[in-house]
Every structure is written in C-alpha cells, then in structure tokens.
Image (tube, helix red, strand yellow):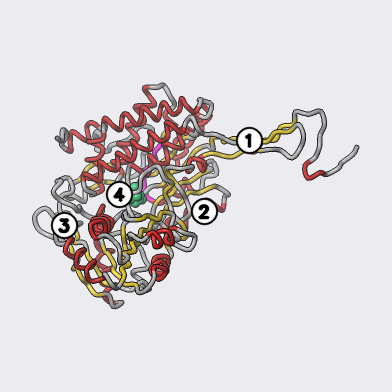
Amino acid sequence: AQQFGMQEALHALGIKEINDGTSTGSNSFSSGPIIESYSPVDGQLIGKVKTTTAADYEKVMQSATEAFKFFRAMPAPQRGEIVRQFGNKLRELKEPLGKLVSYEMGKSLQEGYGEVQEMIDICDFAVGLSRQLNGQTIPSERPGHVMREQWHSIGVVGIISAFNFPVAVWSWNTALAWICGDVCVWKGSEKAPICTIACQNIIAEVLKANNLPEGISCIVNGDYTVGEMITNDTRIPLVSATGSTRMGRIVGAKVAERFGKSLLELGGNNAIIITPTADLKVVVPGAVFGAVGTAGQRCTSTRRLIIHESVYDKVRDAIVGAYGQLTIGNPLDQKNHIGPLIDTDAVNTYLAAIEKAKAEGGKVLVEGGVLSGEGYESGCYVKPAIIEAENHFEIVQHETFAPILYLMKYEGEVENAIDLQNGVAQGLSSAIMTNSMKEAEKFLSFAGSDCGIANVNIGTSGAEIGGAFGGEKETGGGRESGSDAWKVYMRRQTNTVNYSDQLPLAQGIKFDL
Ligand code: UN1
C-alpha cells in the first residue's frame, strides 16, 4: 500500500519551500537565477531551484577540497559504513523518492522504485567493496626487491547526469567514489532538479549524523554552463558524464585537454536479434519493455529489432499485437505501462523522427502521435510507434530518446544479423534471442556484438548493478557501477621497494661508480 501522496513524499524528502519560493539542498550554495521544475505528468510546478553562479561554484569547490583532505584519511571500511547508512536511508525513503522520480521525470512508478532499488543495491555492493580495494604484489626481477600496486583516492569527482535516471546514475558514481575516499560535486539534470535536491538532503543527513564534512557530497544546479565549470576545472581529476553523444564529445575533449580522466556513458542504439529458434514468450515482453519502458528514454532502450526473415511475420504480428495492450497515462497510476516524455521538446524530436523515418521510406506498422484530452494536459504523452525500416536510414543510425522501434529483416546466418547490429556508431547494449548455443556463442564471441553489454534471451535494458555498465564507440567507453569499475575512481601507484644492501638496476644495466 502507498503511504505517501506527492506532498507527503516531498516532505519526507526534506523538500520545502523557503521564503522566496525556492527549494535548496544542503551545501548547494546556489544564489543564481531560478529554474522551475514542471512535472511532465500533469504540467504542474513541483518546485523552484536556484542555479549555481561562478562565485557559488568556488564555495562548493572549497568545501569539497577541504572535505577530501579529511575523507581520504578515513579508513575505507569506515567510509563503507557511511555508505551502508546511506543505503539504509534509501530503504526507508524508497517510496517517496521513487514517487518523486516518477512525478518529476515521468517514468512509471514501478520504474521509479526500481531506480531507487538500484541505488540501494549499489550501496550494498560498495559496502562490501570498501574492504576490497586491493592492490597486488608483483614479482620483481631484482633480488631483495618487491613490487606492489596501491590504489589511492583520486580527489574531487565531478558527476554530470541526465534526466532519465535522475537519482540512480548519481549513486552508481557516488557510492563507489565515497568508499574510494573521493568527494563528489554533482550537476544533476536541470530537467529534474528536485530529484537532485532530494538526494543531496538524504546524504547530507547521514553526513551530519556522523559529524562528517558536508563537502563530501556537493551539488551544483543549472544547465551546461554549470557543467562547463566542472569540465574546465583542473581541481577535478575525474569527470563522470552521462548523457548524449553530443554532450560527451564536448566534455570528453575538454577534460582530455587538461589531462583529466573522463568516464563517459553516452548514447546507445540497441538492438535485439531475433533468430528462428527464439522463444516468443521471451521475445515479446523483452522487446516491448525494452522499447517502451521509461517511454523509450533509457540509454539502453531497444531501438531496433533485427528479425530472421523466416519468423519475421510471426514476430512482427506478436509485437504489434502486444502494443495494442499498452496503456499510456499518469505513470503514478500503476495500471499504466507508459508515462509521458520528459518535455514538449522531446515530443517534437519524437514527431520529427517519425516524419524522417517515413521520408526515408519507413513503413509505419504502429502509428505514433501525441495524446490530448483529459489526463494528457501536459502535452508530453505520446503513443509508442513501430516502423519497418532499414539499418542504413539516417534516422535509424541516430538515437531518438522516445518510444520508436525500428523493425528490420535479416537473411541467412546469424553473422548477417550481427553485422546489422554492429552497423551503427553507438555500442552500448545488445541482445540475441535464440535457443541455438552456436548462435549465442557467436554473438558473444570476439566476432559478435561490439557492445559493452551483450545479452542472451533477455532484452537490452534493465542491467543489474553488479556488472560494469557502459559501452564502446560513440557510447564513450566508460564503465560505471559493478565489477572493477571502482578503479577509475582511484589513482594507481606502482611501488618498488629495495630491502637489500645493493642497488641493482632493472634491465641488468651496469652503472659502476
Ligand atoms: C541509463 O539509461 O542511463 O540498464 C541507465 C538499464 C538501467 C540503467 C539505464 N539499469 O536500463
């Protein structure tokens, strides 16, 4: 049962209006022009947030750099304890935070809760990891010498995240960065600023309860100009940026120019290959959830189905049939599968993409369009569309952040489908539906999918936090979340120690004095 209405949810998250109508998170120092956040669900104003000016940013960085000196000296398992407490707070606040995500961003309530669950999961993962930031010992070629590798905290980590996962992407970065002894400066999306404030309030409370410096977690608010403060700042050795390829190209170049490290998690153009032996019971929900979940606004959303000609008609009809069952409406109402797009600009991009696909020769199988009338007043609700298209169409090569699914055929062997799957500039997620072991293994082999994520008999979206998350090519090459992704949040140091009385040189070099 739901305990919280939206007002109660905001209250539980510490979002309150202050005298001038703005809501501000702990340690945001923001004093610039106001951003207003309107819900795409009902078009209502949720709250107002002040943006971060250049002078405010300096205060944030001062607070962060001071906090870093303290935090890096704290034993990693103790930092893990802080992350454990943060995870517990998220457990308590899962309902209101999930609800706010759904209301401010527009994803279904289930997916809002799912996003908070990802936060809880990454906290658990990070707590365990806080006792496993292990280096290794390496045999030295010299007598009486030992080599080892250590991992040290890297410093202030800049995080730039997108509207579509307004809370989880931050936590994938922060939970790891914090156990690594780093402190974070986060610019959340200006399209979901209340989510940013809510997250900051939650961690601020944990830090306060433990008497820790608030600069361990900082936020800055605003558009790309605030992001630029982070990307240009030589005091920030690592910038983790999630968003469009266009954004990543700019951020990656800027950060590289000053020899910073960047972790880029950019656009996808994810396909599912459907082979003759694929099981329709798995294909249909996998493809449909992948394509319409979060209204097609995940970087892992399924954009393309590459279907063997022998099963094409059967698969197409099953998918088209399933689209007929979908209900679109208020995402807080759990009977609806699909909520709105983030804003009316996104609606225009969606409409333009459909027109472009038609102009290039695409055949519409399920008609799209904008919904109007009762319940759709925000103007952000659209119908998911299916278009028969060819892989080389310019629009198919491009990531449109909306529920548009392109269907295409392949003939002959699975290699032909893999060529189509790989024949785009992006390389995030991919999947094959097959009961053939040979096809599955080919797809996963060096000659198979070129993506960071390659799945068998599940869809392209909904990755678990335990694996490294990210992709190749224009997806940017970064890896966040599980596996050994933590290493990017630390600096590696190689140590050679001589415990002999001699000084033999490596490579057998003689240097006699
Ligand atoms: C994103 O869309 O930026 O794999 C992240 C998934 C989610 C994360 C998506 N766990 O779909």
Up the image or down, 170 lies above or below 311; here it is: above
* Three-letter amino acid code at the position of disc 2: Lys
Given the current orientation, which residue lies at the most extreme left position?
374
Foreground label between 3 and 1? 1
- Marks 1 and 2 in Cβ contact (< 8 Å): no
Q: Which quarter of the rendering shows the C terminus?
A: top right
On the image, numbered disc 2 is attached to which residue? 254
Residue 182, given in percent of the width and then of the height, sits at: 49, 35
Q: Which quarter of the rendering shows the N terminus?
A: top left
On the image, numbered disc 4 is attached to which residue? 191
CA–CA distance between discs 3 and 1? 56 Å
CA–CA distance between discs 2 and 3? 43 Å
CA–CA distance between discs 3 and 4? 26 Å
CA–CA distance between discs 4 and 1? 47 Å
For the residue carrying disc 1, how many other residues have a C-alpha within 10 Å: few (<14), some (14-19), or many (20+)? some
Q: Residue, x 42% and y 56% (percent of image)?
A: 247
Taking depth in this image into account, of 393 and 66 the one nearest to the observer is 393
Image disc number at residue 326: 3
* Three-letter amino acid code at the position of disc 4: Lys
Taking depth in this image into account, of 234 and 80 the one nearest to the observer is 80
Please report the bounds of the magenta region as a residue range: 218-223
Foreground label between 3 and 4? 3
Up the image or down, 275 lies above or below 13; here it is: below
Q: Secondary structure at mark 1?
A: strand
- Marks 4 and 1 in Cβ contact (< 8 Å): no
Q: Secondary structure at mark 4?
A: loop
CA–CA distance between discs 4 and 2? 23 Å
On the image, numbered disc 1 is attached to which residue? 137
Q: Earlier in the sequence, mark 3 or mark 4?
A: 4
Decide whether residue 221 is among the magenta residues. Answer: yes
